[in-house]
């Protein structure tokens, strides 16, 4: 299975740099093994049935991009250097791993000042990443970070424009709860309160799980034989309540539909012999064609990068040739791609028809 099997031509003009407004007005491609329907996200209510369960990732994106000054006394007097920081993940000792640019401009023990309230000391360097110990913790840290930090937009958006205040709302789900992600579960960005209420009124159920999406989600696949690719690890949790709700839906004949590849990867990590069990820990599950799904019946997701592990995941669900057809239709129809782009609803069993 070669990396080139998952390549396709994507015009750069189709990369979305802002989301649809309102969120649920985005377009949505609905695909079965035989048909493709051009819809909008609000049409989701027509494609879901009473008793279906959407699995939602309730991770909360932190404003992980920081810019600060390192001050130093030298023979020439006081000097300062600007240091750009992207936080990656918290460590058990309370420090944070992050990307520091330029790392060579700061020494162990020196401090970066980000605002009047927030600063951090460089306490270690590992694998090209800096380890930072902040002056604040808990709610005080969260509040100061919210003021000083910017949202960590994906590289393909950040290359086109800088993050701004609007991204602090746009790049966060309406149900975000548990802080720790440095990338959003982007399929979930299409939901607003009105859509959630309409789905609930129809009888669609919701289950929340947590997977803290890491910056590794944007790492390219560098091996030609994709089966040898090593996935980055991300922390997640499926509670006893979540596992019980999913089991209840399965037993009643309803469909379990993750919203986003993060929720899918998490419940498949927690699945044993066709049943999702309570689970907590780091997962590096890699889903590519040939994978046997234990919990997932369908998937709502955005449109993904060529040669990405996410494209491999949906190819496992729908089949490689079918995904080529779906993406050719999306490109021809000028769907908007990636994090702020449009949605797709993938129905591999092919039995669903819209219910007006």
Image: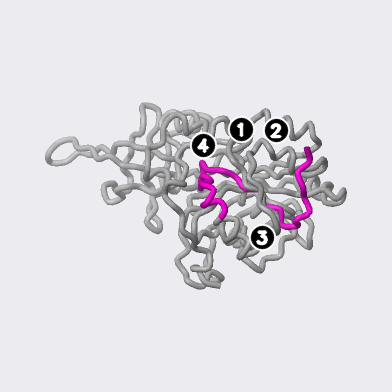
Q: Which residue is mark 1?
A: 174
Q: Residue at x 40, y 59 (%)?
A: 127
Element type where label 4 sits in the image: loop
Q: Nearer the viewer, mark 4 or mark 2?
A: 4
Q: Residues within 10 Å of mark 2 (few under 14, many from 20)?
A: some
Q: Which residue is mark 4?
A: 19
Q: Are marks 1 and 2 in contact (CB under 8 Å)?
A: yes
Residue 251 relative to residue 316: left or right: right
Work out whether mark 1 precedes mark 2 in sequence or the reverse, and give the earlier one: 1
Q: Name the main secondary structure of what is drawn in magenta.
A: loop
Q: Residue at x 26, y 47 (%)?
A: 105
Of residues 72 and 192, the one drawn nearer to the viewer in this rendering: 192
- Image coordinates of residue 169 in percent, x first then y, are 52, 31
Q: Distance between the Cα atoms at labels 2 and 3?
A: 26 Å
Q: Which residue is mark 2?
A: 196
Work out whether mark 3 precedes mark 1 in sequence or the reverse, and give the earlier one: 1
Q: Residue at x 80, y 42 (%)?
A: 49
Work out whether mark 2 precedes mark 3 in sequence or the reverse, and give the earlier one: 2
Question: What's the mark number on residue 318?
Answer: 3
- Image coordinates of residue 350 in percent, x first then y, are 75, 56
Q: Distance between the Cα atoms at labels 4 and 2?
A: 18 Å
Quadrant location, the C terminus? top right
Residue 152 relative to residue 208: left or right: left
Q: Nearer the viewer, mark 1 or mark 2?
A: 2
- Image coordinates of residue 133 in percent, x first then y, are 42, 42
Question: What's the mark number on residue 37?
Answer: none
- Image coordinates of residue 196 in percent, x first then y, are 70, 33
Q: Residues within 10 Å of mark 1 (few under 14, many from 20)?
A: some
Span highlighted in magenta in the image: 329-356
Element type where label 2 sits in the image: helix
């Amino acid at each position: 299975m070669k990396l080139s099997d998952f390549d396709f031509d994507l015009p750069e003009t189709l990369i979305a740099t802002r989301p649809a407004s309102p969120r649920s007005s985005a377009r949505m491609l609905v695909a079965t093994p035989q048909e493709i329907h051009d819809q909008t996200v609000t049409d989701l209510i027509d494609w879901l049935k009473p008793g279906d369960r959407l699995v939602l990732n309730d991770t909360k994106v932190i404003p992980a991009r920081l810019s600060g000054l390192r001050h130093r006394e030298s023979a020439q007097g006081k000097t300062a250097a600007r240091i750009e920081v992207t936080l990656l993940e918290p460590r058990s000792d309370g420090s944070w791993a992050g990307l520091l640019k330029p790392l060579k401009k700061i020494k162990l023990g020196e401090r970066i000042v980000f605002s009047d309230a927030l600063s951090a000391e460089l306490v270690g360097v590992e694998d090209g990443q800096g380890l930072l110990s902040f002056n604040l913790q808990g709610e005080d840290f969260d509040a100061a970070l919210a003021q000083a930090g910017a949202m960590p937009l994906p590289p393909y958006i950040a290359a086109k424009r800088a993050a701004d205040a609007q991204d602090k709302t746009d790049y966060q789900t309406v149900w975000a709860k548990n802080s720790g992600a440095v990338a959003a579960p982007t399929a979930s960005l299409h939901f607003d309160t009105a859509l959630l209420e309409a789905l609930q009124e129809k009888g669609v159920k919701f289950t929340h799980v947590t997977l803290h999406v890491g910056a590794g989600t944007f790492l390219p696949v560098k091996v030609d034989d994709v089966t040898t690719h090593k996935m980055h690890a991300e922390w997640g949790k499926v509670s006893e309540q979540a596992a019980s709700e999913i089991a209840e839906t399965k037993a009643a004949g309803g469909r379990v539909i993750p919203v986003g590849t993060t929720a899918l990867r998490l419940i498949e990590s927690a699945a044993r012999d066709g049943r999702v069990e309570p689970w907590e820990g780091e997962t590096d599950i890699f889903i590519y064609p040939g994978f046997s799904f234990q919990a997932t019946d369908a998937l709502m997701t955005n449109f993904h990068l060529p040669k990405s592990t996410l494209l491999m995941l949906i190819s496992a669900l729908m089949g490689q040739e079918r995904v080529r057809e779906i993406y050719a239709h999306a490109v021809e129809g000028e769907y908007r791609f990636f994090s702020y782009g449009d949605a797709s609803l993938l129905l591999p069993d092919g039995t669903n028809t819209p219910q007006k």
